[in-house]
Image (tube, rainbow, N blue to C red):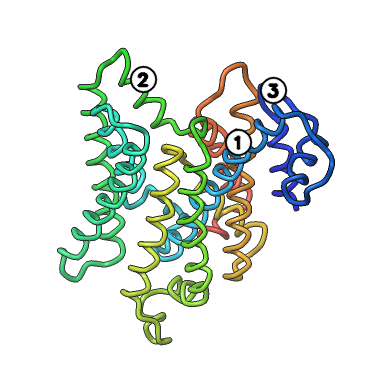
Amino acid sequence: MLLLALAVGSLALGRYPLPVATVIEVLGRKLVPWNSQPPAIAETIVLQVRFPRVIAAVMVGAGLSVAGSAYQTIFRNPMASPALLGVSAGAGFGASLAMLLRQPLIIVEASAFVGGFIAVLIAYAAHRAIRGASIVTLVLCGMVTSALFQALISIVKYVADPVEILASITFWLMGGLSKIGVQEAIAVSIPVLAGSVILFALRWRLSLLSLGDAEAASLGVDVKKLRFTVIVCATIMSGATVCVAGIVGWVGLLVPHMARSVFGLKPGKLLMSTFLMGGLFVLGVDDLARSGFEAEIPLGVLTALIGAPFFLFLFIRFGQRNWQ
């Protein structure tokens, strides 16, 4: 209910503020036709401009949060996040390269998705190439891959036209939802919802995996197959969010800890609460980004400004109890 209330309130916020009653009238008229006729400009703003952005904000937050929770579980590492295997850096490089080549927006988004997947494949291939590799080596391979793609992003920025292209690349890398339309909202919603459904179906096996590989295998879990499935789902969700919104950090790291602190560790309840809290968090931050200042602040900058101190607060408040 809180997410629904915030979504309706978000539709009323912006440079052209609307009464909440008008927003409800516009939405209600689409669901149940009646004689009411809201202003045409209000209908255009609500349905064509703000509604796709609200949906995308919820999906970006939910996707990053659920992916972060899945990574933290399979890696048994409270510091794991969608950036762990290089997804964010790989997607950032793909998008930056497409912008450098002056490609249209749809190619930029597709390149981001492909870049994220290539980064994960490199990390996973390196992990497989190491005989007797443990889960720690996969984490280290992800860190190395992320550093490699960060270096490639720096090269792209170094050779980019400083007047036009460099500014576009820098702004995109800071994350934002200002260019979201209906197509982008659909493009991020489908993989996030599909990935969340699959992870929800695997929630009990996933919780067994958090006990350790040997313990999970003794209980009948195919550890390698399950871990690969979870990584693919989490990577698809993370890549989809990056390709429409750029790099939005801290969400996948912070929100799963918030959900565990409030709702506990029961698998189904934790996954659902992580999904909803992630959507709530990014939607609220995006409202602040586009309505709280004279000019719109990049979403990734605000999530870092809010997320870093709040993460530190959680760490101090709950100590080591929630990190083991």
Between marks 2 and 1 in the image, the one whose residue lies nearer the viewer: 1
- 281 lies left or right of 248: right
- 263 lies left or right of 180: right
Measuring 49% from the left and 58% from the top, which residue is drawn there?
A: 69
Between marks 3 and 2 in the image, the one whose residue lies nearer the viewer: 3
Q: Give the amino acid at mark 1.
A: Gln
Distance between mark 2 and mark 1 Cα atoms: 27 Å
User: Of label 2 and label 1, which has the lower sequence position?
Assistant: 1
Residue 235 drawn at (x, y percent) = 37, 55
Q: Give the amino acid at mark 2.
A: Ala
Look at mark 2 in the image and give the residue it sits on: 167
Badge 2: residue crowd in 10 Å (few <14, some 14–19, many ≥20): some
Provide the secondary structure element on which disc 1 rests.
helix
Distance between mark 3 and mark 1 Cα atoms: 14 Å
Q: Give the amino acid at mark 3.
A: Tyr
Residue 156 versus residue 320: which sits nearer the camera?
A: 156
The dot on residue 48 is 1
User: Of label 3 and label 1, which has the lower sequence position?
Assistant: 3
Provide the secondary structure element on which disc 3 rests.
loop
Residue 210 drawn at (x, y percent) = 45, 70
Distance between mark 3 and mark 2 Cα atoms: 27 Å
Residue 60 drawn at (x, y percent) = 51, 46
